[in-house]
Structures are given as C-alpha cells and as structure tokens.
Image (cartoon, coloured by chain):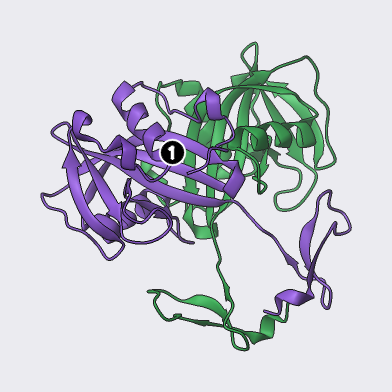
Chain colours: A green, B purple
Amino acid sequence: MDAARFTRRVPEGEDRERLVCGECGFIAYENPKVVVGSVVSEEGRILLCRRAIEPRKGFWTLPAGYLELGETVEEGARREAWEEACARLSLDSVLAVYSIARIGQVQVIFRASLAEPGFAAGPESQEVALFTWEEIPWDSIAFPSVRWALHAWRRNLPGVETNPSEDSRGMAGL
Amino acid sequence: MDAARFTRRVPEGEDRERLVCGECGFIAYENPKVVVGSVVSEEGRILLCRRAIEPRKGFWTLPAGYLELGETVEEGARREAWEEACARLSLDSVLAVYSIARIGQVQVIFRASLAEPGFAAGPESQEVALFTWEEIPWDSIAFPSVRWALHAWRRNLPGVETNPSEDSRGMAGL
C-alpha cells in the first residue's frame, strides 16, 4: 500500500473524515480494536505475566491481547493465555468491558481459572507467576486497565464493570 | 489502494496469514469490529427500529452499529440510538457481549432507558416503536443476536450474558 496516496477527507454520504485513496477512492476504515484477556485466579492467587516486549517491557500484565478475525472473545482470551503463559484456562464470566478511547481499544476481560495445572513464560513474557493480593507488584503494573481489572476481580460484584468514573474515557497514560 | 497488490501470506515473525502488499510489505491487518447497541426499555416496553437499509431492510433491530475510533462503548451506544432512533439514552449496565465469529463482530449490548421523552426514525430506520414483550414482531427480527439480547433483557440476570450455548460461535445465518 502506498500510504502517500491516502488523505483524510469526508467521503460522500458520510459524516466524518476517513482515510481515502486519492487514486481509486478506496476508504481505509480505521476501527477500534478488541483486546481480550483474563484475571486468572488459582486458590486465591492471581496469574500475572512480566512483559518481554514493548510497550512496558519488564512490567506485569494480565494474559491479554488482540482478538483475531474469526475468533469469539472466549477463544481469543484462551489463546492469549496459552501464548503468553502456556496456561489452559477455564473461563468463568465476563468481569469487565473497558474502553481506552485514546488508543481505540475495547477490552473484554474474563474471570478465569486454570483448567489444568501448570504455566510458563511464552515468547512474549519474561516470567509468569501467581501472586496473593498483597504480593501484587502494584508499582510495576503495565497498564491502568490491568489495575482496574484486578480491583474489579477483588470487589467481586455480580455485574460487569466498565471504566472507573475518574477515567471514563480511558485517557490515562501508562 | 490497489487491492491487486495484496496477497495472503504469513509474514515473518507471525503465525497466520495476513494481507500483505507485494510491493512494500505493508500488512493490512483485518480485525474484528465492535458493534455497540442497547435494549432500551420504557415502562416495560422495548424500543425497536425497522431497518431502512440492507442487510435485512424492513426487519426490526435494536439501535446499534459500529463503534467509531476514539469513542468509548458507552458513547457509541448513545450515538447509535441518536442516529437511528433520535433517542437520548440513559445507559444502565452491560447486558451482553456476543461474538459473531463468522463475520468478525463483537457486540456489546447495554441495558438502557430514555433519558428524555421522544424518539423518531433516523435516516437508517423506516420506523421506530415501543413494543410490549408480547407485541415484539418475533418473525421479523433482523438478526439472531437481537433475539438473544431481548431474551437476556427479559431474563434480567445480574451478570453479563454471552453467546447462547447452541450457537457459541455466532454462526447462525440471518
């Protein structure tokens, strides 16, 4: 794709700017992306992955990543836990739906447990470990929404949580 | 964009086929899209929109549509209700998260009510109306997930619902 051909303009019949190819009129829609992940608990301890890749290399995160085309959110959440933590999950329920409007992300986070014993660092993780609530390395958490999800898990309310009111658009920096 | 330049192959360092430009190597990631919508109830009656556009023109649906880049799911759900039903919504909670893997969709559906009286057909609707449960035109519902969401609303369970077990991947036809 020759990116230089694309300009930002309002196509006929639309109400907002899109990336339009100046040559053929092709509209490259830019869509929000779906991240799927899980708070995996095992006898009260929570599984976290230490990132081996940027952004936030060396910081701790949930097993999570971009949903692929053709997957359900459940399939995606299980695949990410397998890729990042070599863990087979049993998904319980949807814990949270977060919007990170600043970067065009919607995050669907599940409550989960290990379907079979064992986990290990996948290629995108430096290490994978279980933490009690008190042991969680709060100063080294990769993203605000990881903190949100951990606290949502801890509150253990029946419904699904969304962005906290103090950051309703998910605009916080890292 | 000259679509003819793109071929499907596995880029270096990836594990699945992507659309890759044969000229510059640009990878056009194809991502699932997020649909946001609402079951809007008003004194026990539910607001439905009769589609003025394909697919399923003439059939009844929830106010719903694609999330735009830079929006939260809440903002998107409110915008769609405004565009399709000229209705201002008060969102209650997330009712359901559905995956339609066959067409690469994730649907986030809210429980909502009218924030102010009044509604009307927007440009994409032939008509908009409130229905009691018994009045819902079940034979003229546009999509299976509209039926799923209506039944989820009716069950009124505390958690968020996901795909029904008989269609866990959202593979049903229209």
List the single residue furthest toward the front: B139
Q: Residue at x 54, y 23 (%)?
A: B165
Q: Residue at x 45, y 22 (%)?
A: A155
Residue B27 showing in the rendered view: yes
Question: Quadrant of the image for the N terminus of chain B?
Answer: bottom right
Q: Position of residue B68 (x, y in %)?
A: 45, 60
Looking at numbered disc 1 in the image, what kind of residue is underneath it? Ser
Pointer 1 local density, CA inside 10 Å: few below 14, some 14–19, many at least 20: many
Q: Position of residue A107 (x, y in %)?
A: 54, 43
In which quarter of the view is residue B83 placed? bottom left
Residue A62 showing in the rendered view: no
Q: Is residue B92 above or below residue A21?
A: above
Q: Is residue A79 above or below residue B119?
A: above
List the single residue furthest toward the top: A43
In which quarter of the view is residue B21 placed? bottom right
Side (left or right) of B44 relative to B52: left
As helix, strand or loop, the secondary structure at mark 1 comes to helix
Residue indicated by mark 1: B145
Side (left or right) of A76 relative to A172: right
Q: Which of A40/A89 is in front?
A: A89
Q: Residue at x 34, y 35 (%)?
A: B93
Q: Position of residue A112 (x, y in %)?
A: 61, 22
Q: Is residue A54 above or below residue A110?
A: below
Q: Residue at x 78, y 49 (%)?
A: A53
Q: Dot 1 falls on which chain?
A: B
Q: Which of B147/A159 is in front?
A: B147
Q: Position of residue B88 (x, y in %)?
A: 21, 53
